[in-house]
Image: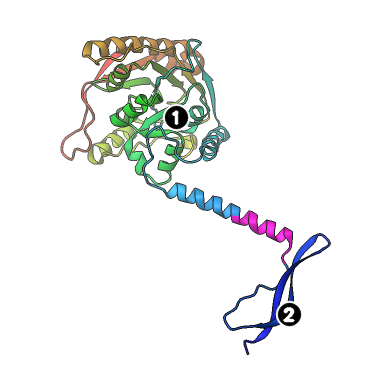
Amino acid sequence: DLRRPRGELSFVRRGSEHHWRVSPVGTIEPGQVVRVGALSVASAASAWARAVMLGWLARIARLLLHRGSIRSPGAQWGPRWLALLTARTLARTSAAVGVHYDVQVSESFDPAQQYMVVWHPHGAFTYSALCYGGLLSLLRQPVRWYTGVASILFKVPLLRQILLLLNARRCDASVLRALLAEGHSVGLQPGGIAEQLRTTHMQEQAFFPPNLSFLRLALEHGTPLLPVYIFGENQLFRTTPTLQRFARRIFALSGIPAVVPLGRWGLPWLIPRPTNVLIAFGQPVYAGPPQEPTDAAVEEVFTRYSAELNRLFEEHKDARLPSEIAARGLTIVRRTRPVQPPKAKGKNQEAIAVISRL
């Protein structure tokens, strides 16, 4: 029998609790629903807190699974609090495994100036750029920049979202031009995969592309270059000639830089070796007003940039590098033709030219 006593809902207060009271005044017709019982304010607050938490978790999950494009390269991707949380988590994780960072900025640095931040060396993974560079950019220490990274990294789930949160963008000429046109500073690692495939913990190296495209971009926009050297990046992981030859062979066949560096306890990839790292910002190298990037102008800027990079290296090498590595100096390598992956037949050995060995 579905016909039950029907009730009216009224609100009453008993001590510190609030209740809904049902007073029978009739019958409940089939299909009608009447909520009967008591709901305390504490229970309501708890239910509201759970609903808010679930809502935020759903928002974060949606953000992490989102693969759509951003409005413009310089637009903020995701909430700032999540970006800072991600960057600080990476930095604290590095400190927990024994990797500690110091930052030094040149006195001639102008925080109001737009820059092209160019850092060396690449290292096995660009570990410092990921685990600490993102935090420096978000906190504007010393300047906020958008880092250009290999497009293939944006195809890796979760890593793509982390990179976007940390102001990383595709290292594509159109993207970098758009960022510079909007007045943003950009960050580049000119050695790229070619340097990664030849990284060694026993020699400091700085690789440059054949046509110095990053300098041409700086000349087009009149953007000063800010050289950065990360002392200790190469010592976070050990490399061996055999493993590096293997990585180059895999890259030649598949286009994937399958570098296998050895970290703490000799384990591959997982945990870096305890290292005190210095991120040293050099003096700006001015490219002049926006101009056509002729070969002569590019070579002139490259000469001045190389000189400042060498000066920066010489200033800190003895204090921040093992003595035997510091004694070998910095090798500047300019490739004479670009990397061409993949190549199924023959060897894919790119030509390189050693510009200087200090």
**Quadrant occupied by the N terminus:** bottom right
Total marks shown come to 2
- In terms of secondary structure, where does tag 2 sit? strand
Where residue 271 appears, as percent x and y from the top left, is 49, 37
- In terms of secondary structure, where does tag 1 sit? helix
Q: What is the chief secondary structure element of the magenta stretch?
A: helix
- Whether residue 269 is visible here, answered yes or no, is no
Q: Are marks 2 and 1 in contact (CB under 8 Å)?
A: no
Give the residue furthest to the front. Answer: 25
Q: Does the magenta segment cover residue 323?
A: no
Residue 357 circle label: none
Give, as a three-letter code, the residue at label 2.
Answer: Pro
Looking at the image, residue 44 lies above or below residue 200 = below
Q: Residue at x 52, y 37 (%)?
A: 80
Find the magenta span and give its range: 39-51
Residue 24 circle label: 2
Tell which of 235 and 323 is nearer to you.
Answer: 235
Give, as a three-letter code, the residue at label 1.
Answer: Ala
Q: Residue at x 29, y 33 (%)?
A: 245
Q: Give the mark nearer the N terminus: 2 vs 1.
A: 2
Tell which of 64 and 46 is nearer to you.
Answer: 46
